[in-house]
Amino acid sequence: MQKIILTVTNDLSYDQRMIRICTTLAEGGYSVRLVGRRQRASAALRQRPFEQVRLGCFFEKGKFFYAEYNLRLFFYLLFHRFDLVCSIDLDTLMPGYAVARLKSKPCVYDAHEYFTEVPEVVRRPKIRWFWNRVAGFFIPRIRHAYTVGPMLAKEMTRLYGIPFEVIRNVPWSSPRNSRPDWNGIKIILYQGWLNEGRGLESAISAMAFLGGCELWLAGEGDLSEELRAQTLEMGLDDKVRFLGFLQPEDLREITLKAHLGLNLFERKGLSYYYSLANKTFDYIQAGIPSVQMDFPEYRHLQEACGVFSLVEDLDPQKLASAIRGLLDDRREYDRVRQNCIEIKNDLCWEKEAEKLLLFYREIFSGERPD
């Protein structure tokens, strides 16, 4: 049985995308191992149809973490057998490529995001210079790569001179649709990392203009403490709920209770501008309308399917107006909700899984061109 090792820098518990990918590969007949890191606050891993390994590190963030983790990952890969290694994002590509080259094995690059264009990197010139050098050296030497959306694939193909396939980050199909309670508080849901450039400060500020609503934030991140402080300072602690990290199965249940979803990337680098976020499809799959940024991928999806409302900027009053426009107009809300339900079976992981398995089969069979 061919063995695939996939590498990430997170602690595995809440990574819906990697759970889907690894489950699909395991069910497709491969021996699959997902390698991440162990943190002090890491939750116990749930049993999956693939192996899960966490590497312990002394450092938990910053340049020392990346240096330590890459070194530990290098030696882990060096002393463990595999037939193919898949490096997820730029921060695990160096050891993946190096060890695969030493062992004469294929290395796949999975670009979950445009790493050198995320806000945390863009605003730090020295850090950005370093990762641009890493990307410029390693990515053009990779023979097989994929990313999450057409715009990112086009940009990375142009920039690095290698073809990028598109494997969209969409959820498993589900027969269940949301049934929100219109007699009580209206739930506005954000799911994902509480990090810079996600429009979360504006979302919280918008709650001052939205009576009868609650904002539920499912996730944690670098801005967790700042967002909680903002909520208290604005006197909105009765209207904003921090749910923390949730297991994927639990998050799906929460999503089904929501009236409206949010995906509010700021244009702080091309990664978010060209993004096609998984939360967009999670909302569609649950049958709930959402408010999204007027960026190329979301505009294209809206023109084709009519499954949300687009906003051009994150002014809190304008954002509140867009939210209220859906929640107060039940006819429009029901129209958008029905569009979600009608298109959800075309925007599901089962279809992307077929492309993923074909991608790996062609590598192992030698049919995929270099």
Image (tube, helix red, strand yellow):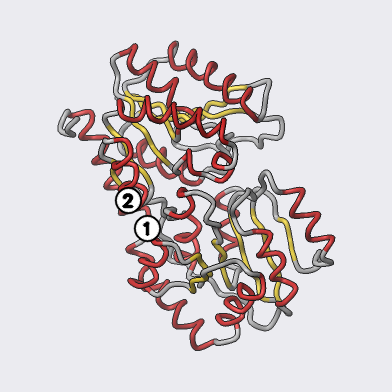
Number of other residues with Cα within 10 Å of mark 2, as a class: few under 14, some 14 to 19, many 20 or more: many
What amino acid is found at the position of numbered circle 1 in the picture? Cys
Q: Nearer the viewer, residue 286 or 78?
A: 78
What amino acid is found at the position of numbered circle 2 in the picture? Glu
Q: Nearer the viewer, residue 14 or 133?
A: 133
Counting from the top left corner in percent of width and height, residue 344 is at: 38, 66
SS for dot 2: helix
Q: Give the side of residue 278 with respect to residue 28, left or right.
A: right
Report, in whole angstroms, how far the alpha carbon at label 1 lies from the one at label 2.
7 Å
Eyeballing the image, is 289 above or below 7?
below
Eyeballing the image, is 154 above or below 55?
below
Q: Are circles 1 and 2 on residues that touch, CB within 8 Å?
A: yes
Counting from the top left corner in percent of width and height, residue 106 is at: 29, 23
SS for dot 1: loop
Number of other residues with Cα within 10 Å of mark 1, as a class: few under 14, some 14 to 19, many 20 or more: many
At 43% from the left edge and 55% from the top edge, which residue is drawn?
Answer: 276
Residue 171 in view (yes/no): no
Check the picture and name the quadrant holding the N terminus: top left
Eyeballing the image, is 322 above or below 94?
below
The residue under label 1 is: 348
Q: Quadrant of residue 171?
A: bottom left
Number of numbered discs present?
A: 2
Counting from the top left corner in percent of width and height, residue 331 is at: 50, 88
Q: Nearer the viewer, residue 205 or 301?
A: 205
Counting from the top left corner in percent of width and height, residue 242 is at: 72, 56
The residue under label 2 is: 352
Residue 358 in view (yes/no): yes
Eyeballing the image, is 134 above or below 355?
above
Q: Give the side of residue 65 with respect to residue 276, left or right.
A: right
Check the picture and name the quadrant holding the C terminus: top left
